[in-house]
Image (cartoon, helix red, strand yellow):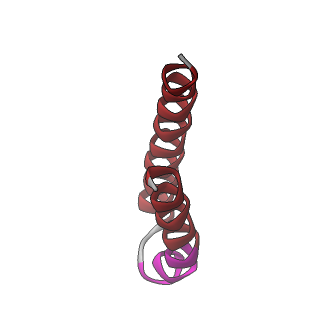
Amino acid sequence: MKNADSHITIDMVSLMNPLTTLMIPDSAIKAKIAMSTVAIVKVDSGIITFNPHIHI
């Protein structure tokens, strides 16, 4: 369930990015991209740490 939610949020970000590029200057876009990548990395690390827990 949580994995599916994270995938949905990533899809939402990818859909919103083109709209933000039209309305926000480049520096803000780069900052948002950096934030989204950090969020994705955090989600991936959480899944990686959570999987062994489920296995045990």
Looking at the rendering, the stretch of residues picked out in magenta corresponds to 15-23
Q: Residue at (46%, 35%) from the top-left corner?
A: 42
The relative height of residue 44 versus residue 8 in the rendered view (above or below) is above
Residue 18, x across and y down, in percent: 57, 79
Residue 21 colored in magenta in the image: yes
Q: How many marks?
A: 0
Q: Is residue 31 above or below residue 8?
A: above
Residue 5 percent coordinates (x, y): 45, 61
Q: Nearer the viewer, residue 4 or 40?
A: 4
Comparing 55 with 13, the one in front is 55
Residue 25, located in which quarter of the rendered image? bottom left
Q: Main secondary structure of the magenta part?
A: helix
| Residue 21, x across and y down, in percent | 53, 75
> In the rendered view, would you say 9 is above or below 34?
below
Asked if the magenta segment contains residue 2, the reply would be: no
Residue displayed at 48% across by 21% down: 53
- Residue for point 49% across, 77% down: 16
Camera-side residue: 47 or 9?
Answer: 47
Task: Establish if 26 lies above or below 19.
Answer: above
